Amino acid sequence: MSSQVIPVEEFDYVVFGGTGDLAERKLIPALYHRHAAGQIVDGSRIIGAARSDMATEAYRDFARKALEEHVRRDLLDAADVDSFLARLAYCAVDAKSDKGWAELKALLGDEDRVRAYYLAVGPSIFGDIADRLDQNGLIRERSRLVIEKPIGKDLASARALNAVVGKHFREDQIFRIDHYLGKETVQNLMVLRFANALYQPVWNAAHIDHVQITVAETIGVEGRGDYYDKSGAIRDMVQNHLLQLLCLVAMEPPASIEANAVRDEKLKVLRSLKPVDQDTVGQVTVRGQYKAGAAHGEAVPGYLDEIEDKGSDTETFVAIKAEIETWRWAGVPFYLRTGKRLPSRVSEIVVQFKPVPHNVFGKAGAEMHPNRLILRLQPDEGVRQSIMIKDPGPGGLRMRDVALDMTFAENFEADAPDAYERLLLDVIRGNQTLFMRRDEVEAAWEWIDPLIDGWASTAQKTAKYTAGSWGPTASIALIERDGRTWHEAEG
Ligand code: BG6
């Protein structure tokens, strides 16, 4: 099966922070892939914008290096690379002064086409850029703004940031990226749930025992210590990625796939989360921080060796037992866990169904396992549904747990595209379904803030775990107390 490529209309993508890490590792490679796939029509341009002076030729060199480093060699075609680089231009622009804005305006010209402004810069200058775009008449009907996390560090700062960009752009022009929503399996979750009659009737507390969402990473903080130490896993991963995944599992069927229909349903889930505060935080959350250990057989330093503040108690691991207070989900725990320096890089959602109500098989029935639906986000994107079958052959009745395997890698010619490929072009299509609306971001903080405050007021410290292990033992106890176990997530 090869995927169908439908070109998007002509656009200008202006990437503020065009020489930064995100542009280099993700945005330029993603746009290259879409260009090579034939999805970007002639005339579309990508304009890098940053403070330093640089000629367009030098920017193209920068982009060529980014491609060489971050695109698989067999996907780098010399002719495609050249035609891609020819789309690139550079403009030196200073967010804090008038420098470069007239030049940017001249470069963009007067043509009425889709313009996307991607702010691949720190949130502290979102407001400056939005102000200057407006002052210079660069925001038009078909202009769009793309921003990324961190969207605030708590509810108040998220509101302030949303207000700063909302002053100049309408909500339907603002695309808040959560790159987890662009992952193939995450979109497949919606298709699985709403394009099959099979799951909907059993997707509730009567049939589902619990849900597990694991996002495990092997990497440490990778030179991002300054940012990370102020965020920790709760702000870096849970407030956005894990809660978004939880919403897609738990939301009611939307009336359509239209952006606001989907986002209305996600918002209801966030607002139905059982509050976690100082009275409950100690029972339903675990914080961890890695100490020196091993990754892939090699010794790796501990978190405190990698950051400035040697007394930091920032968590690099979190496990949470979350609950959703609705008729559909009452009594069904959603166990969330994420951490750095875990044994394998694996992200998955496990939906564990209840056991059958009665064993008709006598002793042989002891082999029965409850069904599990496993949605693997990475690596090896795919979906597995475990079911019980009879072990083939004569003799006594034996049973076996087998997986109906819908692994994408075997079903598609190419690898699953990177999340950014889809999201960057959804911005041009004007499709906000996979982007977070203002109220969603704020509702997520409304749930996270009391949890973090609870940690502070109860002085809940991180439990140390050895790099290369599955986090603190308290995380195992969190789920085992309820008579359940973490699914063994092999990478
Ligand atoms: C980012 C976090 O949002 O997601 C990082 O800031 C994390 O800390 C990354 O490593 C994980 O993304 P992925 O796509 O590699 O799972």
Image (cartoon, rainbow, N blue to C red):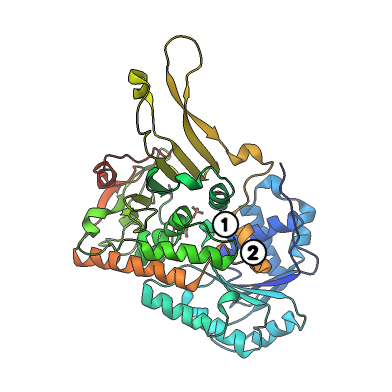
Residue position marked by numbered label 1 in the rendering: 182
Q: Residues within 10 Å of mark 1 (few under 14, many from 20)?
A: many
In this view, the residue in front, 410 or 384, is 384
Residue at the (37%, 56%) spot, across then down: 327
Q: Tag count in the figure?
A: 2
Q: Is residue 413 above or below residue 160?
A: above
Q: Residues within 10 Å of mark 2 (few under 14, many from 20)?
A: some
From the image, which quarter does the N terminus lie in? top right
**At which x and y percent is residue 287?**
28, 55
As shown in the figure, which amino acid type bears the numbered disc 1?
Gly
Q: Residue furthest top?
A: 395
* First in sequence: mark 1 vs mark 2: 1
Q: Is residue 347 at all visible to an observer of this figure?
A: no
Within 8 Å: ligand 1 and the Cβ of disc 2? no
Say left or right for 325 vs 113. Answer: left
Residues under labels 1 and 2: Cα distance?
Answer: 10 Å
Query: In the rendering, which numbered label is found on residue 58?
Result: none
Query: In the rendering, which numbered label is found on residue 426?
Result: 2
Q: Are marks 1 and 2 in contact (CB under 8 Å)?
A: yes
Residue 279 appears in which quarter of the rendering? bottom left
As shown in the figure, which amino acid type bears the numbered disc 2?
Asp
Say left or right for 28 vs 388. Answer: right
Residue 368 appears in which quarter of the rendering? top left
Residue at the (58%, 66%) spot, across then down: 259
